[in-house]
Image (cartoon, helix red, strand yellow):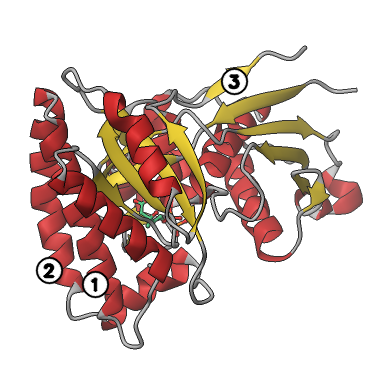
Amino acid sequence: VRAGVTAVAHPNIALVKYWGKRDESLALPVTGSLSVTLDIFATTTHVTLAPPVPADMNGDAGLTGDVVTLNGRPAGGAAAERVQGFLDLVRALAGRRERAVVESVNQVPTGAGLASSAAGFAALAAAASAAYGLDLDGRALSRLARRGSGSACRSVFGGFVQWHAGTGSGSAGDVSSFAEPVPVGPLDLALVVAVTDAGAKEVPSREAMRHTMATSPLYRAWAQASNTDLTRMRHALARGNLTAVGAIAEGNALGMHAAMLAARPAVRYLSAGSLAVLDAVNALRADNVDAYATADAGPNVVVLCPRADADRVAETVDAIEAVRSVHLARPGPGVRLRSER
Ligand code: DP6
């Protein structure tokens, strides 16, 4: 039995969102983004390499036979292809040929729409790069994870993390677009994840961001506002000003959803249940609780609030009929390798 490598990563929730690529093949974003890594819903990924296949015997066959299981089931279709493509990239960087056996498990309630490509590709980037003998620092690892899924580059680090859009194209663009931790003042932030009933069938985010860029008259305006939001968010975090952090995050997220709604045809992720949570957050604010909402490419809503108010926020949100489950989170750790037992 050959030794493998295990990596653990957590999802992140963006406070200033990433929505749109200026280069699809390199996953270079239009705007910078800033997130907080969570301490729940970890993905654990184990990578083992198969013995090398002699080139003269098998040609390229050794490069196409990766075996991928997700939560104990063989991965197929688009998911398997995406992992395969990512492993090809790692092999090209490492100058290696062996195929890989990848086993990935996430601690996410099934059917909750919380499985995270960010945690998945951050864990895969760390485990696969180590298995193939690449010795990457955090920045380089974030660049690699970015190629699997843009938001994954932020899960390489714990706490608050900025992904720089970078400048230029080609290898200059690639080098300049990485994630790094952001300094924060005292900030006792909790995150209450509200899993809500889904609305219409969801469009994959990759397609939806392409469509929003191509057809939404509001996209440019949102992207411009995002640049200002990034600067303001960095200041708010440095001061530990939770009210400002929440207000900027909520404005940026709703602006992103507005840009999607203005696409033709519209992309709509927020469901009636999501709006009910937004109403409850407004009511909490009217009652002097510092609660703010954000949502990604799905109907679930994440409420940001002071840790001291987290139980009250969770109870309020849990009482909403369309809310199926509520999960309490705090800022969590970056990706790490786990030593083999
Ligand atoms: C709405 O990172 O999943 O969650 O790069 O195409 O894999 P790809 O997209 P992905 O998009 C995440 C979009 C978002 C906002 C965010 O996390 O910043």
Q: Quadrant of residue 163?
A: top left
CB of mark 1 near ligand 1 (< 8 Å): no
Q: Residues within 10 Å of mark 3 (few under 14, many from 20)?
A: some
In this rendering, would 267 be left or right of 141?
left
Local secondary structure at mark 1:
helix
| Residue identified by numbered label 2 | 221
Do the CB atoms of the residues marked 1 and 2 lie less than 8 Å apart? yes
State which image quarter holds ligand 1.
Answer: bottom left
Q: Nearer the viewer, mark 3 or mark 2?
A: 2
SS at mark 2 in the image: helix
Image location of residue 276, percent across then percent down: 35, 62
Instruction: Provide residue 26's location: percent of width, then percent of height.
Output: 41, 55
Q: Position of residue 272 (x, y in %)?
A: 39, 70
Identified by mark 1, the residue type is: Ala
Q: Mark 2 belongs to which amino acid?
A: Ala
Q: Which residue is mark 1?
A: 259
| Quadrant hosting residue 15 | top left
Side of 191 relative to 104 (left or right) = left
Is residue 167 shown to the viewer in this render? no
Viewer-nearest of labels 1 and 2?
1
Query: 201 or 282, which lies in front?
Result: 282
Inspect the image, locate mark 3, and give the three-letter code of the amino acid beneath it. Leu
**Measured from the top left, where is residue 183 in percent x and y?**
20, 22
On-image quarter of the C terminus: top right
Nearer to us in this view, 55 or 68? 68
Towards the viewer: 272 or 210: 272
Seen at 19% across and 42% down, the residue is 246
Tell which circle, 1 or 2, labels the residue nearer the N-terminal end.
Answer: 2
The residue lying toward the viewer, choosing from 290 and 36, is 290
Pointer 1 local density, CA inside 10 Å: few below 14, some 14–19, many at least 20: many
Q: Which residue is mark 3?
A: 337
